[in-house]
Image: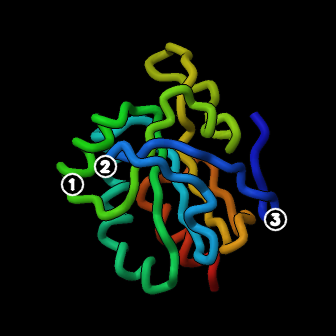
Amino acid sequence: MTELEKGDAAPDFCLNDQDGKTVKLSDFKGRKLLLYFYPRADTPGCTTQACSIRDSFKDLTGKRIASVGISPDLVDDQKKFAAKFNLPFKLLADEEHKVAEAYGVWGEKSMYGKTYMGIIRSSFLIDEKGVIIQAWYKVKPEDTVPNAIDALK
């Protein structure tokens, strides 16, 4: 797994959102993007992370920062998650985890002594031209928004 760093070009993506609409990195040209990867919709940590972005949505958009979450969940699962928690931003379905691999967030994890492959919770702040301002791997759910805001100071 190769981690991306400040100054790297953000890997392009083209995925369906919770409404089945195609979303590409280029859709965010001209504004910053807080792109975050989470393991599974409607789980405790992922809910904490998504709700913290929801609760900071006005502050982020005021700073011209769009927010997008990506997980390997199905589009329908993303739709239910977004509706349940009134999430005002796009959730993208990366079912084959190709985008997660491109961002270096698909890796080996372990739980209860069992090893498996999955999303390593991470977030990226991307500038208006598609260049990574900052990358955070193994980020705590509650640190996603503060990290992004601090990176702009």
The residue lying at 39 percent from left, 35 percent from top is: 40
Query: Residue 126: x percent and y percent?
Result: 65, 66
Q: Residue furthest right?
A: 7
Is residue 45 visible to the viewer in this orientation of the structure? no
Query: Residue 45: x percent and y percent?
Result: 36, 45
Comparing 10 with 4, the one in front is 10
User: Helix or strand or loop: what does disc 3 sit on?
Assistant: loop
Looking at the image, residue 134 lies above or below residue 96: below
| Residue type at numbered disc 1 | Phe
Query: Residue 61: x percent and y percent?
Result: 43, 79
The residue lying at 46 percent from left, 64 percent from top is: 67
Corner quadrant of residue 26:
bottom right
Q: Residue furthest top?
A: 114
Q: Residues within 10 Å of mark 1 (few under 14, many from 20)?
A: few
The residue lying at 28 percent from left, 35 percent from top is: 76
Comparing 112 with 149, the one in front is 149
| Residue type at numbered disc 2 | Thr
Q: Quadrant of the C terminus?
A: bottom right
Q: Residues within 10 Å of mark 2 (few under 14, many from 20)?
A: some
Looking at the image, residue 78 lies above or below residue 31: above
Q: State yes or no: discs 1 and 2 in contact (Cβ < 8 Å).
A: yes
User: Helix or strand or loop: what does disc 2 sit on?
Assistant: helix
Which disc number belongs to residue 47? Answer: 2
Which disc number belongs to residue 7? Answer: 3
Comparing 61 with 146, the one in front is 61
| Residue type at numbered disc 3 | Gly
3 or 2: tag closer to the N-terminus: 3
1 or 3: tag closer to the N-terminus: 3
